[in-house]
Amino acid sequence: MERTLILLKPDAVQRGICGQILGRFEQKGLKVVGLKLMRITPELAARHYEAHREKKFYAGLVKFMTSGPVVAIALEGIDCIRIARNLMGATFGADAAPGTIRGDFGVSRSFNLVHGSDSKEAAEKELKLFFPEGVLDYAYDAFAWVYDPIEELKK
Ligand code: UDP
Ligand code: MG
């Protein structure tokens, strides 16, 4: 089992499509283990996007991410970092394939609705930043049917 951090960005909140986006992850079979509406401070944005500090889009990105509330989500599942990124689609909405979140809901290069951790290291760091209190551990009955217990859960 793996965990990842998803952020529904301020554009998703203001457009009222958080429920639909969260539904994409849920219907795929990923378990929600953390969920909150919150405001990102400039300090948190700086730590979260540390790797992009030198990029020309950095200042605009921090301004965007702190411009309104976001929904922070912690997801759990086998290989969930990669699976969540695939559900999100390519970074720029205009390039993202139909069927993906970014492909179905937007066209922008910056207002692209959703963030997802891109590696195990990033997921661990980002989950600590957004859920310092930890995530919730509970039995998720759907997993009994999402996974073939003989195939996947033995690995
Ligand atoms: N971004 C932008 N302009 C660019 C590239 C990225 O505004 O040319 C923003 C966009 O919101 C993106 C975020 O910066 O989601 C982080 O960029 P990254 O390359 O990590 O894309 P992601 O991992 O989100 O697909
Ligand atoms: Mg990224």
Image (cartoon, rainbow, N blue to C red):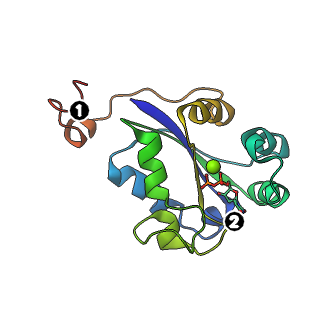
Determine whether the beta carbon of the residue marked 1 sits less than 8 angstroms from the nearest atom of ligand 1: no
Q: Is residue 37 above or below residue 50?
A: below
- Give the residue drawn at x 52%, y 72%: 105
In the displayed structure image, the side of residue 88 where residue 72 appears, left or right: right
- Give the residue drawn at x 17%, y 36%: 148
Depth check: give the residue in front, 18 or 86.
Answer: 86
| x and y percentages locating residue 59 in the rendered image | 85, 56
Q: CA distance from mark 1 to mark 2?
A: 37 Å
Residue 28 disc label: none
Determine whether the beta carbon of the residue marked 2 sits less than 8 angstroms from the nearest atom of ligand 1: yes
The disc, 1 or 2, on the residue closer to the chain's N-terminal end is: 2
In the displayed structure image, the side of residue 37 where residue 21 appears, left or right: left
Task: For the C terminus, give its image quadrant.
Answer: top left
As helix, strand or loop, the secondary structure at mark 1 comes to: loop
Q: Amino acid at mark 1?
A: Glu
As helix, strand or loop, the secondary structure at mark 2 comes to: loop
Q: Are marks 1 and 2 in contact (CB under 8 Å)?
A: no
Depth check: give the residue in front, 52 or 127.
Answer: 52
Q: Residues within 10 Å of mark 1 (few under 14, many from 20)?
A: few
Q: Quadrant of residue 99?
A: bottom left
| x and y percentages locating residue 16 in the rendered image | 57, 68
Depth check: give the residue in front, 104 or 130.
Answer: 104
| x and y percentages locating residue 75 in the rendered image | 47, 40
Q: Amino acid at mark 2?
A: Ser
What is the number of callouts on the image?
A: 2
| x and y percentages locating residue 144 in the rendered image | 21, 35
In the displayed structure image, the side of residue 105 where residue 113 appears, left or right: right
- Give the residue drawn at x 49%, y 58%: 88
Circle 1 is placed at which residue position? 152
Residue 110 disc label: 2
Task: For the N terminus, give its image quadrant.
Answer: top left
Q: Quadrant of residue 113?
A: bottom right
